[in-house]
């Protein structure tokens, strides 16, 4: 045999090997990596990639490598719809995780329902899984649970009259809706209902009005930087009533932006922020601590509440594929059977009637003391 | 807490926001007056003032005063480079071309800031003192006093420059009649450069004094630029007291509207005022109507 024939045979064996190697499992991801919701999309994309790499390093799922295909929706529902269509028609993914925000998710739902591809969203809007849709699941806690957590605390402390200050985007208006819906159930009366724009830099007019009212507590619902400005303005105006925030600011960035004004603020958060303060008996503690450590090693930043949504989505899909294979309908069926899965956002139990998987124990109340988080009991 | 102190609070908050709008508006007016174009990138110089101060302070770690100086110098340099590269080479300087170029420039500067500094919001410390000051039931922060003081100083220096120095008078001459000015020996191209330099440094100063209160990020320029533009329109694009009053009026109306009517309409108020002025009195509140004889 001459060199040419040897080379030809060598190349052929490589081709044959490739053909025999099992095709990768394709999982699509839609995240708002750039744009106004990038504080959600970027940690989510990082986390999803980190989980995919780790799965592949330990041999893949049932010997097959995972291929994560990420598209950036830029927080724009039109782009989300285009990307979802591409994932399904061109990339032939078995499941889609994301999108990061409720607006994008609601736009993508009709597409996945029609195509029969399971969607595990990382967004919080309660409308995503209520009413239940057979192909749609979510990992982020409902904002109604966060509201319940705050109201429960207020009722326990005999606070009856609250003022609410919400941002005018979809996160804030969803929170406002839940705040108004659930107030009566906890004996709470909303005596002042104000809003602010996502890019506003001065909330002193609204806070002056609130300071003059009979409110006993102020609940601010928004994502950075607005609530930080609210906290600082409140301190400047000498607003004496206690300030409560939403889980939208459950990251160290809020404390950094609000500075001294953050002291004493109470908010609901996923357990990931206070992982090391939890009792050892907590079912999530082990998962939480390893997630925080992994994220820190990979990205030199603290793993936060938002990246956790993507971790949960990836791991839930992985578990479903391990149990049932990677056909979209099998993944869907296995997801519905998941019980007591300890994730980052909480302990997940999906049923045919409940595709959000969490209850109000998914949140803990934390207080900001000395520029750090402290568990509130 | 009575109604009077509530109104006083709205007034004070509104005046301090208004001072920022005035400075930005003056930037628009100066360039408009010497070149006849609206520089829609003005808002980005405001953003650069704040972001560069953060950058020099927290990343390069120079002392605060040096960081501020460097921020203003870098912003001015950016303004000059922008004029040289984007405005001067134009062979056909029609208004439409120039407007589109300045809009493109603003998007470019914003994108560059996003790539270099990321999308996060950043804080810079207040200048001196942080305890609130109470005044008849309304409170302001020392930073607000700094804002009023510095705005006042900049306006006075502006007025002195434009009315009592040769370069200032030359720039005003260009505004009245470009051809005539160049006929009497004024280097019009150099005056255009000066006007960009002055506007970008004023924008940077506005950004710097506001950032300790409002925090800064790569996209604060959009809204601030628009509001400053409104202030300039209300003032009739005058290089002096008209635009200042325009900014103050805008700030106070916004604040009152948010407090008394509804906070959701805050931005709407600014733009409704802009539309009303453009429909009813397009020369601004403080200028006499101009007519041109053909």
Image (cartoon, coloured by chain):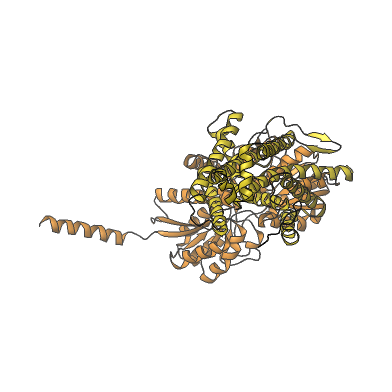
Chain colours: A orange, B yellow
How many labels were placed on the picture? 0
Q: Residue A311, how many percent across, how many down?
A: 53, 50
Q: Nearer the viewer, residue B189 or B261?
A: B189
Left or right: A213 as drawn, with respect to B156: right
Query: Could you tell me if residue A263 is visible in this image?
Result: no
From this view, report whether residue A281 is shown above or below residue B278. above
Q: Residue at x 55, y 30 (%)?
A: B61
Farthest residue toward the bottom? A114
Q: Residue A233, how many percent across, how many down?
A: 74, 41
From this view, report whether residue A45 is shown above or below residue B169. below
Q: Residue B241, how many percent across, how many down?
A: 74, 44
Q: Residue at x 61, y 42 (%)?
A: B170
Q: Residue B76, how many percent across, how many down?
A: 56, 40
Left or right: B294 as drawn, with respect to B252: left
The N terminus of chain A, quarter of image: bottom left
Left or right: A347 as drawn, with respect to A159: left
Query: Could you tell me if residue A288 is visible in this image?
Result: yes
Q: Nearer the viewer, residue B228 or A286?
A: B228
């Amino acid at each position: 045999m001459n060199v040419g024939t040897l080379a030809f045979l060598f190349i052929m064996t490589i081709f044959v090997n490739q053909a025999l190697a099992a095709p990768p499992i394709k999982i699509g991801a839609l995240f708002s990596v750039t744009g106004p919701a990038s504080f959600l999309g970027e940690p989510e994309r990082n986390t999803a990639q980190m989980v995919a790499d780790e799965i592949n390093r330990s041999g893949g799922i049932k010997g097959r490598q995972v291929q994560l295909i990420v598209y950036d929706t830029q927080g724009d529902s039109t782009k989300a719809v285009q990307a979802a269509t591409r994932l399904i028609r061109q990339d032939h993914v078995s499941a889609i995780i994301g999108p990061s925000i409720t607006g994008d998710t609601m736009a993508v739902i009709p597409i996945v329902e029609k195509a029969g591809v399971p969607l595990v969203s990382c967004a919080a809007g309660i409308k995503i899984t209520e009413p239940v849709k057979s192909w749609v699941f979510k990992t982020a806690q409902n904002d109604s649970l966060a509201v319940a957590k705050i109201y429960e605390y207020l009722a326990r402390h005999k606070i009856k009259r609250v003022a609410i200050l919400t941002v005018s985007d979809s996160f804030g208006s969803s929170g406002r809706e839940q705040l108004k819906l659930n107030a009566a159930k906890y004996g709470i009366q909303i005596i002042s209902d104000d809003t602010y724009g996502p890019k506003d830099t001065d909330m002193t007019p609204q806070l002056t009005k609130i300071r003059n009212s009979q409110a006993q507590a102020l609940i601010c619902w928004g994502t950075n930087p607005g609530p930080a400005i609210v906290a600082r303005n409140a301190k400047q105006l000498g607003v004496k009533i206690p300030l409560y925030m939403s889980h939208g600011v459950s990251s160290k960035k809020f404390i950094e932006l609000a500075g001294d004004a953050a002291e004493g603020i109470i908010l609901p958060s996923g357990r990931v922020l206070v992982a090391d303060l939890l009792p050892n008996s907590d079912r999530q503690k082990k998962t939480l601590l390893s997630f925080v450590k992994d994220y820190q090693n990979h990205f030199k930043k603290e793993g936060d509440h938002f990246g956790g949504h993507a971790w949960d989505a990836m791991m839930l899909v992985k578990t479903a594929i391990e149990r049932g294979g990677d056909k979209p309908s099998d993944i869907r069926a296995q997801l519905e059977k998941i019980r007591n899965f300890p994730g980052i956002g909480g302990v997940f139990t999906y049923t045919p009637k409940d595709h959000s998987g969490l209850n109000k124990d998914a949140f803990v109340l934390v207080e900001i003391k000395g520029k750090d988080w402290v568990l509130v009991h | 807490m009575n109604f009077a102190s509530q109104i006083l609070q709205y007034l004070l908050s509104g005046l301090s926001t208004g001072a920022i709008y005035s400075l930005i508006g003056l930037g628009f007016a100066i360039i408009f007056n010497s070149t006849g174009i609206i520089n829609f990138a003005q808002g980005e110089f405001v953003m650069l003032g704040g972001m560069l101060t953060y950058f020099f302070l927290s990343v390069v770690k120079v002392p605060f005063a040096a960081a501020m100086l460097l921020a203003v110098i870098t912003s001015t340099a950016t303004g000059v480079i922008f004029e040289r590269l984007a405005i001067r080479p134009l062979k056909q300087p029609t208004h439409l071309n120039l407007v589109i170029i300045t809009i493109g420039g603003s998007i470019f500067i914003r994108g560059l800031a996003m790539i270099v500094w990321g999308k996060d919001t950043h804080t810079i410390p207040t200048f001196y003192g942080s305890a609130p000051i109470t005044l008849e039931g309304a409170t302001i922060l020392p930073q607000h006093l700094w804002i009023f003081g510095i705005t006042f100083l900049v306006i006075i220096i502006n007025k002195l420059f434009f009315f009592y120095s040769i370069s200032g008078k030359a720039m005003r001459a260009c505004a009245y009649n470009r051809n005539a000015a160049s006929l009497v020996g004024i280097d019009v191209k150099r005056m255009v450069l000066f006007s960009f330099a002055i506007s970008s440094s004023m924008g940077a100063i506005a950004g710097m004094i506001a950032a300790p209160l409002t925090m800064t990020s790569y996209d604060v320029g959009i809204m601030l630029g628009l509001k400053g533009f409104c202030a300039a329109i209300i003032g009739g694009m005058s290089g002096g007291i008209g635009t200042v009053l325009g900014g103050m009026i805008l700030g106070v109306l916004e604040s009152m509207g948010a407090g008394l009517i509804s906070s959701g309409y805050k931005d709407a108020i600014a733009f409704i005022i802009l539309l009303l002025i453009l429909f009813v009195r397009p020369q601004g509140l403080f200028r006499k109507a101009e007519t041109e004889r053909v």
